[in-house]
Image (tube, grey):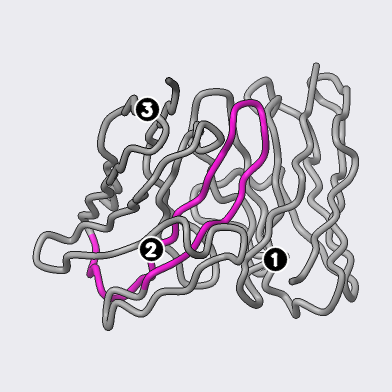
Amino acid sequence: DIQVTQSPSSLSASVGDRVTITCRASQSVSDYLNWYRQKPGEAPKLLIYAASKLQIGVPSRFSGSASGTDFALTISSLHPEDFATYYCQQTYTTPFTFGQGTKLNI
Amino acid sequence: EVQLVQSGAEVRKPGESLTISCKASGYKFTNYWISWVRQMPGKGLEWMGKIDPTDSDTKYSPSFQGHITISIDNSITTAYLQWGSLKASDTAIYYCARHNTNFDSWGQGTLVTVSS
């Protein structure tokens, strides 16, 4: 199985800050790496797909990048609704695997 | 509008069986796989398995193989997740999601509580 290691597990920040969350895959996943945001009590929401493509309707403050098996999600300027938990996911091969999650705290 | 609407919360005893559902609408059902994802209380997301609506082909995570069954009824565009014998450790929220290479639409989640 492909392991996806996400870091950090938690992060404290303020409105307006720029933050970056990273994921490392245990082997190549090409660009089959997605990012989701989950607010408390809600289902996850797709933010970035194929490592760097912005999902329709998602604000442009979210961006994704890739370098080999290392991937990053950057939020350029935090809004209040961004304080949530973020997950990466590889869909290169089954079993699809999620990162452990990053909880973004105020 | 794409929608995945899941069945309501369930409470069962250990050893009992259960089937929960996911009704899809707003898109061509056979164009996307359906996956099920588990979220245990206070924990992260775990992929359980997927089904291809075109031929009902299924793939399961090794962590769940043999404990769950995923099925589909194309005539009513509904996917199902079934347990034959629940354990207390099955207590969780279960999400369905449609996907090709990304999970772009999710159900609202079904809370399953297993307790004696």
Contact check, label 2 and label 1, Cβ < 8 Å: no
Query: Element type at marker 3?
Result: loop
Q: Residue furthest top?
A: A106
Q: Nearer the viewer, residue B70 or A64?
A: B70
Residue drawn where x is 81% and y is 63% of the image: A65
Residue that numbered label 2 is attached to: B34
**Mark 2 against mark 3, which lies toward the viewer?**
3
Q: CA distance from mark 1 to mark 3?
A: 38 Å
The range drawn in magenta is: B27-51
Label 3 chain ID: B
Which residue type carries mark 1? Leu
Left or right of residue B6, residue A88 in this image: right
Contact check, label 2 and label 3, Cβ < 8 Å: no
Label 1 chain ID: A
Q: CA distance from mark 2 to mark 3?
A: 27 Å
Q: Earlier in the sequence, mark 2 or mark 3?
A: 3
Image disc number at residue B13: 3
Q: Nearer the viewer, residue A35 or A56?
A: A35
Contact check, label 1 and label 3, Cβ < 8 Å: no
Query: Dot 1, how many residues are within 10 Å of its Cα: few (below 14), some (14-19), or many (20+)?
Result: many
**What is the quadrant of the C terminus of chain A in the image?**
top right
Which residue type carries mark 2? Ile
* Residue A98: % across, % down: 69, 54
Residue drawn where x is 49% and y is 48% of the image: A57
Residue that numbered label 1 is attached to: A33
Q: Is residue A19 magenta?
A: no
Q: Is residue A83 above or below residue A67?
A: above
Q: Nearer the viewer, residue B116 or B45?
A: B116
Residue drawn where x is 81% and y is 25% of the image: A16
* Residue A22: % across, % down: 87, 52
Are labels 1 and 3 assigned to the same chain? Answer: no
